[in-house]
Image (tube, rainbow, N blue to C red):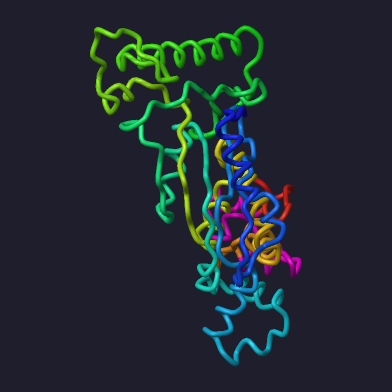
Amino acid sequence: MKLTNEQAQEIKDQQSQEYKTKRVTAPELEKILYEALPILDHGFIRVVDYMGDDTSIVQSARVSYGKGTKKVSTDEGLIKYLMRHWHSTPFEMCEIKYHVKLPIFIARQWIRHRTANVNEYSARYSILDKEFYLPAPEHLAAQSQSNRQGRGDVLEGEKAKQVLDLLKGDAEQTYNNYEMMLNERYDGTVIDENAVGLARELARMNLTLNTYTQWYWKTDLLNLMNFLRLRADHHAQYEIRAYADAMLDTVKKWVPITYEAFMDYRVGGTEVSAKGKEVLKKLIKGDNIDMDQSGLSKREWNELMEAFDLKDKLI
């Protein structure tokens, strides 16, 4: 990731500002506020604003549940209780805003999470930067033979080179055509003083999906955790997972107690169906039970066995 001199100066100016406030702040998050954290080859995330911290969640919960929370003496215990019992509303009291630079095809995955306020860079108004995502060799993989939306073995040798050349060549060619249609270079210079360029809102349709876009994305902590539970999972596509992993680290700096509870109960925990629960009860008792007796499908059975490291019972 390379920032322009103008972008670097803007971040420096933002970080040099200091204000007195009576609001709660998160000291560790303050240290990286406005900083561009590199993702992929040209992308980044920046935390540009936030509201609340772990104490905000606790205060909200104690208002909601009153005397019932007196049984939980510590903030950590209360947050764990809320997470464990899916009492989600108090987590909505914290909000965070990110500035994200990402490839268009990842933005289209991301926007499926319809629980945030989004303001994207306008390609009707401005010219998109001449930057494209090209996978690193270790992430250039064939289609999985067992998963329609997964990756298989990493491509090697001449095949890998051919694919990278195609991705780079197509992106550069379509961007060159984009500039020709606009009659304007990405740096603002006019190509032909005597020609009229195509409208930006039309010229953009020719660009490849690995072109980078940017947006501001604001959400509350509850919906952020729902996003991260899916997109930081090992089943998620690598490219969006790279962003989710970096965002997880910002959550750790922002609300460390909530982060630990989230990692324990959501990321590291396992949901079990009623039938799955009965299977586990019998296995704990030492009873023999197989898939046919369980009422579970083959996929459900194998997922349950894998979750509890019972690999000898996989089918």
Residue positioned 56% across, 59% down in the render: 50
The x, y position of residue 273, in whole percent, is 55, 64
Image quadrant where residue 84 sits: bottom right
Residue positioned 74% across, 48% down in the render: 312
- The total number of labels drawn is 0
Name the quarter where the C terminus is drawn: top right
> Which of 83 and 132 lies nearest the eye of the viewer?
132
Name the quarter where the N terminus is drawn: top right
Residue positioned 64% across, 69% down in the render: 54
Q: Is residue 34 positioned above or below 164 on the image?
A: below
The x, y position of residue 269, in whole percent, is 66, 60
> Which of 61 and 309 lies nearest the eye of the viewer?
61
Residue positioned 73% across, 52% down in the render: 309
The x, y position of residue 56, in whole percent, is 59, 73
Q: Does the magenta stretch include residue 268?
A: no
Image quadrant where residue 175 sits: top left
| 220 to the left or right of 191 | right
| 95 to the left or right of 34 | left
> Which of 314 and 159 lies nearest the eye of the viewer?
159
Question: Magenta part mainly helix, strand or loop?
Answer: helix
Q: Give the range drawn in magenta.
A: 277-304
Image quadrant where residue 189 sits: top left
Q: Does the magenta stretch include residue 285?
A: yes
Q: Is residue 240 positioned above or below 136 on the image?
A: below
Q: Is residue 306 positioned above or below 50 on the image?
A: above
